[in-house]
């Protein structure tokens, strides 16, 4: 077993100040591995097994099926996948009640008297990258997992820590529910503020407006242009202050409305091989999460994964156009018309033909955009509260759990 930096956390509840130091133990001595009971379901069979029971894999719930293998409180530890490295997906998570688990997640049952909720929180604080036994494909095999060193207090102290961290989780979940409620409200409002398919006016309209709405195609009120990528891109990346902004898909925050900065810049010589767009233009990705619009607040070059909506008609508000493209009707149009058998993508012609219905009065466009913008600000405020709580929890965990050296022996 490896040596621990210390066997006492920085922060300890008063009633445990004089309790014994935390004890060293391996994961294999703390939990039973129930991996022998898990079973994958063939992709072709899942459609016939649609049901109420969650079907878990390495990253969490991937489907719901009509049968179950387990019916108890358990811990799942993702066995393989990129989430071992990125941690953007849940690697450790608690499951309760009836469920099915495939062979991409280890199934752990705490050995009494260890507290399941404590172990889930503790295991969330571990970096599993150093235990990766895979090559190009990260993997946590059972033999290595069993050797992962832990340092644990007595069960009563485990329960106290679990209760503390669970209370923060409840606050995070409550805040997340508020965000989801606001997003659902926004989606429903957009369905009423923009005309339904076949209609020329919306169901919900601000009382001061009576003018007609005009039906056009996006290409009638703007220019649709695809980005370009100079290759090899490394030859054009620069740290010079006079470099041109270089926007990649990974640079945008999927929750944001605006693009305000880029992580990299390119040389001016890249202009002949890419496309530069201006502040106020709209951009959207043409593959993967295609059709999601953003408004540029900066001038930037864009690679060929972007399509730009430029030279927008002066009678059309870019903010209104942003929400119109984001609306359920427009997104359905993109989904129905995207090409490709595997990864779907949009081309410039499909985007040009997007039906757009626009109020003839610019003030009505602005009113609709302002209404939806206020909801976006409210959603952003609640999202920030979620991040503050997560940061607080992370800092608390660093103090509640003793730190450990890297590696196992």
Image (spheres, rainbow, N blue to C red):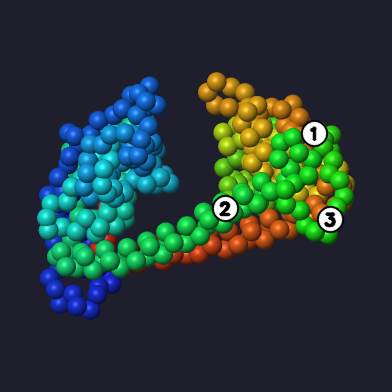
Residue at which label 3 appears: 209
Q: Residue at x 83, y 47 (%)?
A: 359
Specify whether residue 304 is in view: yes
Residue at which label 1 appears: 217
* Left or right, 71 with reference to 207: left
Q: How many angstroms separate mark 1 from mark 2 (CA)?
A: 27 Å
Do the residues bearing badges 3 and 2 touch, measured as CB atoms within 8 Å?
no
Specify whether residue 387 is in view: no
Element carrying mark 2 = helix
Q: Residue at x 14, y 45 (%)?
A: 32
Q: Is residue 47 above or below residue 185?
A: above
In the depicted view, which residue is nearer to us: 214 or 283? 214
Q: Position of residue 302 (x, y in %)?
A: 69, 38
Q: Is residue 357 above or below residue 120?
A: above
* Left or right, 140 with reference to 209: left
Q: How many angstroms separate mark 1 from mark 3 (CA)?
A: 23 Å
Q: Nearer the viewer, mark 3 or mark 2?
A: 3
Q: How many angstroms separate mark 3 from mark 2 (CA)?
A: 26 Å
Q: Position of residue 203 (x, y in %)?
A: 72, 48
The quarter holding residue 350 reads: top right
Residue at which label 2 appears: 183
Q: Residue at x 31, y 56 (%)?
A: 125
Q: Nearer the viewer, mark 1 or mark 3?
A: 3
Of the two numbered discs 1 and 2 on the same chain, state the one appearing first in sequence: 2
In the depicted view, which residue is nearer to us: 52 or 229? 52
Q: Residue at x 69, y 27 (%)?
A: 347
């Amino acid at each position: 077993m490896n040596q621990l930096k210390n066997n006492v956390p920085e922060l300890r509840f008063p009633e445990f100040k004089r309790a014994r130091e935390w004890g060293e133990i391996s994961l294999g001595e703390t939990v039973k591995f129930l991996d022998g009971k898990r079973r994958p379901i063939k992709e072709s069979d899942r459609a016939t097994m649609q049901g109420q029971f969650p079907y878990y894999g390495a990253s969490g719930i991937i489907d719901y099926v009509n049968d179950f293998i387990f019916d108890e409180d358990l811990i799942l530890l993702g066995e393989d996948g990129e989430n071992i490295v990125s941690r953007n997906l849940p690697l450790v998570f608690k499951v309760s009640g009836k469920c099915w688990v495939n062979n991409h997640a280890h199934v752990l049952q705490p050995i009494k008297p260890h507290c399941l909720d404590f172990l889930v929180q503790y295991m969330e604080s571990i970096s599993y990258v150093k235990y990766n036994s895979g090559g190009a494909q990260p993997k946590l095999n059972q033999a290595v997992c069993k050797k992962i060193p832990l340092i644990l207090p007595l069960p009563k102290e485990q329960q106290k820590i679990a209760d503390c961290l669970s209370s923060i989780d409840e606050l995070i979940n409550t805040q997340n529910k508020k965000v989801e409620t606001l997003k659902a409200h926004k989606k429903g409002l957009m369905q009423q503020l923009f005309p339904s398919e076949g209609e020329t006016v919306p169901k919900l309209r601000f009382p001061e407006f009576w003018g007609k709405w005009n039906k056009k195609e996006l290409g009638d009120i703007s220019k649709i242009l695809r980005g370009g990528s100079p290759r090899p891109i490394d030859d054009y990346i620069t740290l010079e202050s006079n470099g041109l902004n270089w926007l990649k898909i990974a640079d945008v925050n999927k929750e944001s409305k605006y693009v305000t900065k880029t992580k990299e810049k390119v040389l001016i010589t890249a202009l002949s091989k890419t496309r530069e767009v201006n502040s106020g233009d709209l951009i959207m990705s043409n593959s993967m999460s295609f059709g999601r619009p953003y408004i540029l607040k900066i001038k930037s070059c864009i690679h060929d994964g972007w399509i730009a909506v430029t030279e927008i008609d002066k009678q059309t508000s870019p903010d209104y156009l942003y929400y119109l493209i984001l609306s359920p009707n427009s997104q359905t149009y993109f989904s129905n018309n995207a090409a490709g058998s595997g990864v779907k993508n949009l081309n410039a012609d499909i985007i040009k033909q997007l039906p757009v219905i626009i109020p003839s009065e610019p003030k009505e466009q602005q009113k609709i955009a302002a209404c939806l913008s206020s909801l976006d600000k409210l959603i952003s405020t609640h999202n920030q509260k979620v991040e503050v709580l997560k940061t607080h929890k992370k800092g608390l965990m660093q103090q509640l759990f003793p730190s450990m050296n890297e590696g196992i022996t």
